[in-house]
Image: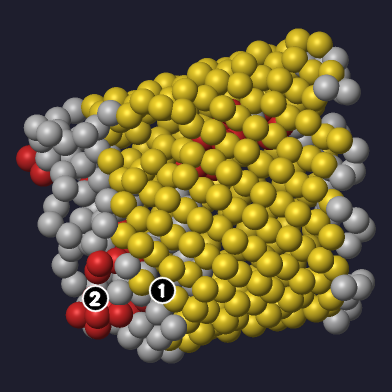
Amino acid sequence: MVRGRLAVGALLASVAVTSPALAAPKAPVDKFSVTASVRVEHQSNMSGVSESEAKLRGVSPADTTYAPGIGVTVNMPVGRQTFFLNGYAGYLYHDKNSIYDSERLTLDTGVRGRVAICDVVASANYQRALSSFEDIVLGPTVDNILEVKGARLLASCARRTGIGVTGSVAREVAENDHLLLRPQDYTLTTYMGGLTYSKPRLGTLTLFGQHQETEYDHRVPIAGQSDGYKSNAAGLTYERHLGARIDGSVTVSYTSVEGTGVSSPGVRTDFDGFTYQLTAAYRASQRLRFDGAFGRNVTPSNRFGNTYDVTTNYAVHANYELGSRISTSVGYSQNETDSTGGQIFAGNLTDSTVKIVSGSVLFKLNRRIGFSFDAAHEEREANNPRYTYDNTRVGVTASATY
C-alpha cells in the first residue's frame, strides 16, 4: 500500500524471538548490489477511511503517487562471520494530496555467523515513513511520520542432532512526530529462552518462554489509558524441511497480557489466550510455488486511544513462472484487528477486518532490468462506518540492479 503503514515491528519481533531458525546464518546471495526503482500507482481511495470521511478531512480519495527509490544489499564474509546490510531510501510524491509527501527509509544491518557450536545474529534496524491514516481517529487531517528503531541479539547453540539451547533479546522504540500521536510512542523489550531438539529426518522442536514489556512514556493517566503492558508466553515451535519442495514452521503458545499503570474503570487491559504463527511453502513444480501464513499475535498499537492490538492474519499466495523472463502471481490476505487496553473515545477505531485480493506480472528485460505490473482490491469493515471503505489500486514499477 502506498499510504504504507509502517510495520511497527512488534509482530516480526514476536515471531523472530520465538523461532530459532532466525538465529541461523543464511548463505549470502550477493556480496554487493544496488537497485534503483521508480513506481507509479493509482488508488481509487488511498485515504484509509470512507470517501465521505476523507472529504471532511480535506483529502482527495482518488490519487496517483510516484515513488523513486534506491536499495542496497551487502553480504560480506569476514572469516566465519558475514556482515549484512539491506537498506532502502526513497520519497513518496502525491499528485493531489501533497500534504502526505514524505520520505521512506529502511535499514537492517548486522553480523551473523558461528561461534563454537552457536549460530549468532547481532543486528539493528531502522524505519521511517508516513504512518497509516487509520492511526488518526480524531481531529483534522494529520501527516504523521512514524520512526521505529530496534536492535536484537539471537543465538542458537546446538549440534546437528540432539539437544540445544536458544535465546534472544530485542528492543524496539517507536516515535511519532505529531503531537496528537505522541502518547502512542512506545519502547518494547523482549526476552526469549528455550530448549531445542533437532534430528535431520524429523526437524527441530523448540520449547520456549517469552517475556515482553511495553512502555508508553508520554501518556497522561487522566486520559484513561494504561501506561503500557507486560506479556508472558510459553509454547512450542516445530520446523521441518522436506527436500526442496516443502518447507514450514508452526508456533503455538499461550499468552497472558496485563496492563500496567493507571487506567479508567471498565477499560479492558488484560488478555489471556492462544497465539500462533504458521508458515508453509510448497513448490509443486519448477514453475509453480505456493506460500501460506496464518497467525494470531499481540502487538503494540499506534492507533490513538489504544494500548495493544490482537491481530489475526491469513494469507495465501501462488507464483507461476511462464518462462525465464516472465512470472505471475495471485494472492489473498485477511487481517482482523481487535484494539484493546485504552479508553473508548467517540468514534475510535477498535475493530476492523481488511481483505485484499491481488495479482502481479513481472517481466525481466535482462538480468539487470525488470518491470512489474500489479493490481489489488481492498475492503475493510470496521466498528465505525467512517472507517469502512474499499480501494482499488494499480501500479507499475521499473527497476535496474547493478
**Mark closer to the chain start, 2 or 1:** 2
Q: Residues within 10 Å of mark 1 (few under 14, many from 20)?
A: many
Q: Quadrant of residue 49?
A: bottom left
Q: Quadrant of residue 322?
A: bottom right
Q: Nearer the viewer, residue 193 or 360?
A: 360
Q: Would you place residue 65 above or below residue 104 in this image?
A: below
Q: Residue at x 58, y 44 (%)?
A: 294
Q: Nearer the viewer, residue 344 or 334?
A: 334
Q: Is residue 18 left or right of residue 56?
A: right
Amino acid at the residue labelled 1: Asp
Q: Residue at x 43, y 44 (%)?
A: 311
The label shown at residue 307 is none
Q: Position of residue 101 (x, y in %)?
A: 41, 77
Q: Quadrant of residue 285?
A: bottom right
On the question of residue 117 being in view, the answer is: no
The number of callouts visible is 2
Amino acid at the residue labelled 2: Glu
Q: Is residue 164 left or right of residue 60?
A: right
Q: Nearer the viewer, residue 177 or 235?
A: 235
Which residue is tagged 1? 390
Which residue is tagged 2? 53
Q: Residue at x 47, y 65 (%)?
A: 4
Whole-number angstrom distance, CA of label 2 to CA of label 1: 13 Å
Q: Determine the secondary structure under disc 2.
A: helix
Q: Nearer the viewer, mark 2 or mark 1?
A: 1
Q: Residues within 10 Å of mark 2 (few under 14, many from 20)?
A: some
Q: Position of residue 283 (x, y in %)?
A: 84, 51
Name the colouring of the figure. secondary structure
Q: Determine the secondary structure under disc 1.
A: strand
Q: Residue furthest top?
A: 163
